[in-house]
């Protein structure tokens, strides 16, 4: 009996007991909100990550894949990104930006 009360208190179930399934607050078909909401991508950024709407974290992930694939991370100061022609448009014409500044500049290309 004590173990059953302890299990109820902790919110855990003993072996063989069923627990109520959790339901999500978001109904199916309702648009996503927050950080996982798909964002529209500008034509300049689309050259790097593609033109289909993506959540902000996916955009950053694809951007880093592009940077690593094209060896654009500065070899001496790894916090800097050296822009090629495609990234120069995204970075507002700058040749080199820090990875922290990069996020700010990329946000301008998402709506």
Image: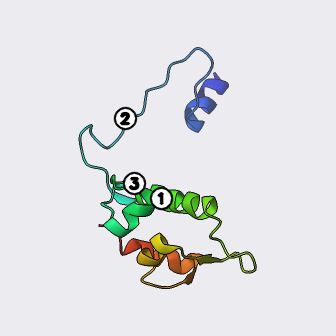
The dot on residue 23 is 2
Q: Mark 1: which secondary structure? A: helix
Q: Mark 3: which secondary structure? A: helix
The dot on residue 57 is 1
Q: Is residue 42 visible?
A: no
Picture residue at 66% right of the left edge, 26% below the top: 2
Mark 3 / mark 2, whichever is N-terminal? 2
Mark 1 / mark 3, whichever is N-terminal? 3
Coordinates of residue 66 in the picture (x, y in percent): 55, 60
Q: CA distance from mark 3 to mark 2?
A: 19 Å
Coordinates of residue 34 in the picture (x, y in percent): 36, 59
Mark 1 closeness class: few <14, some 14–19, many ≥20 residues within 10 Å: few
Q: Is residue 25 above or below residue 87?
A: above
Coordinates of residue 95 in the picture (x, y in percent): 54, 84
- For discs 3 and 2, the disc positioned in front in the rendered view: 3
Question: Mark 1–mark 3 contact, CB under 8 Å?
Answer: yes
The dot on residue 36 is 3
Q: CA distance from mark 1 to mark 3?
A: 7 Å
Mark 2 closeness class: few <14, some 14–19, many ≥20 residues within 10 Å: few
- For discs 1 and 3, the disc positioned in front in the rendered view: 1
User: Which quarter of the picture shows residue 72?
Assistant: bottom right
């Amino acid at each position: 009996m004590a173990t059953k009360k302890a299990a109820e208190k902790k919110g855990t179930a003993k072996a063989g007991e069923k627990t109520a399934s959790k339901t999500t607050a978001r109904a199916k078909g309702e648009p996503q909100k927050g950080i996982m909401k798909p964002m529209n991508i500008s034509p300049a950024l689309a050259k790097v990550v593609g033109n289909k709407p993506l959540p902000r974290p996916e955009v950053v992930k694809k951007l880093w894949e592009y940077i690593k694939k094209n060896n654009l991370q500065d070899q001496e100061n790894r916090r800097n990104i050296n822009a090629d022609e495609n990234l120069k448009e995204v970075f507002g014409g700058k040749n080199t930006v820090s990875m922290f500044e990069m996020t700010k500049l990329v946000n301008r290309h998402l709506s």
